[in-house]
Image (spheres, helix red, strand yellow):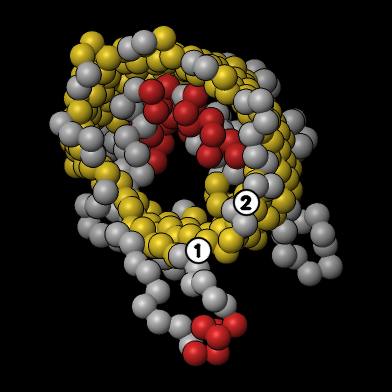
Amino acid sequence: MSSKALAVPVSMAMCSPVLAQSSVSLYGVLDAGITYTSNISNASGRGRAIQFQDGIIQPTQWGMTGAEDLGGGVKAIFKLENGFQLSNGSLISNGSIFNRKAYVGFTGPWGKITLGRDFDFIGETFAGYSNAVITPSGLLGWGLSSYASGGYILDNRVWGDQVSNAVKYLSPTFGGASAGAMYAFGNTPGSLGTNQVMNFIVNYAQGNFAGSVSYFSQHNAASGSANEIVWAAGGAYSLGALHVVANLASAELSSATKPRATTLETGAQYFVRPDLALSLGYTQQWRNNDLGSANTFIVGADYLLSKRTDAYLVGVLGHDHAYAAQVEAAFGAPSSSDMQSAVRVGIRHHF
């Protein structure tokens, strides 16, 4: 959906011989399906669940984005994006209507700069190198490694963080390479460092290959004022109908025991025909402080009903050697043993 300015004040029209072209677009993703989960811990010790769930393969969301041509290749841009529950229409984050993204900025021959709330570069880029995206598992594929490493702080971090009060810059591409930097103000009076975020990324894409390396730091990321440091590297390669991805991310806290989780993801997708993709994924996580390791196996099928709608089937098996496994981190279903499986059938629609 787009719109153009119908009128401008007479004074502006007299000062500007050419009216700037502007557009606004509405977009979104809707995901709904049925999930079976095994080994759920309950009052009797062990149970299972069959549930309607949404926002699994991809967060259910809607948003609007716009641009105004300022001339000379420069545009003013904005984006407002909201996440919500398709099951009942409620907001993902109460009191925050545009909880996913809310920024304004400029693009031009010199790159792109935005101010406001946005994903860090890891969440913006590295999901494309993950098995949670190359397979139709979404949050099911990320659940084990994010929960088991403790409190959603030391997870595989590939889904990224939404960062508020941020200034974000991405350079143009030169010879296949680009770079970006983000700084978020903590907005704490009397302290520049409290709650601040810094994030950097270097990207390279040439032919069938794309890869990225990123650094992220956040002050006071966890209770006790611990700081978080994340390093991530990932890549993707396409060869005809075959698409392969991998990424390695390490997250560490500065608290007394310096807890650290290092997560490796690998995945492959193959189009057996133009409208049907089969996929496999594997995640391995290692932790320090004698907290063992965890792994996840994923198998999936995605059927493209149209350019905007697909139906999918996915199965996930998680195994944790230290914590009770939890495949569905976003829905709070801890396992009654060190293993848990989930099977989901769903439909997703883009608009």
**Depicted 241 relative to depicted 247: above or below:** above
Q: Nearer the viewer, residue 170 or 93?
A: 170
For the point 34% across and 22% down, the residue is 135
Quick check: can you spot residue 346?
no
Q: Nearer the viewer, residue 247 or 103?
A: 103
- In the picture of the structure, the residue carrying the numbered disc 2 is 108
Circle 1 crowding by C-alpha within 10 Å: few under 14, some 14–19, many from 20:
some
Question: Does label 1 or label 2 sit earlier along the sequence?
Answer: 1
The answer to whether 339 appears left or right of 12 in the picture is left
- What is the x, y in percent for residue 142? 43, 29
The alpha-carbon separation of the residues under discs 1 and 2 comes to 12 Å
Given the current orientation, which residue lies at the most extreme bottom position?
10
- What is the x, y in percent for residue 307? 23, 35
**Depicted 153 relative to depicted 291: above or below:** below
Callout 2: SS: strand
Callout 1: SS: strand
Q: How many marks?
A: 2
**Depicted 297 relative to depicted 351: above or below:** above
Hey, which quadrant is residue 216 in on the image?
top right
The amino acid type of the residue labelled 1 equals: Glu
For the point 26% across and 48% down, the residue is 351
The amino acid type of the residue labelled 2 equals: Gly
For the point 59% across and 82% down, the residue is 15
- What is the x, y in percent for residue 252? 69, 31
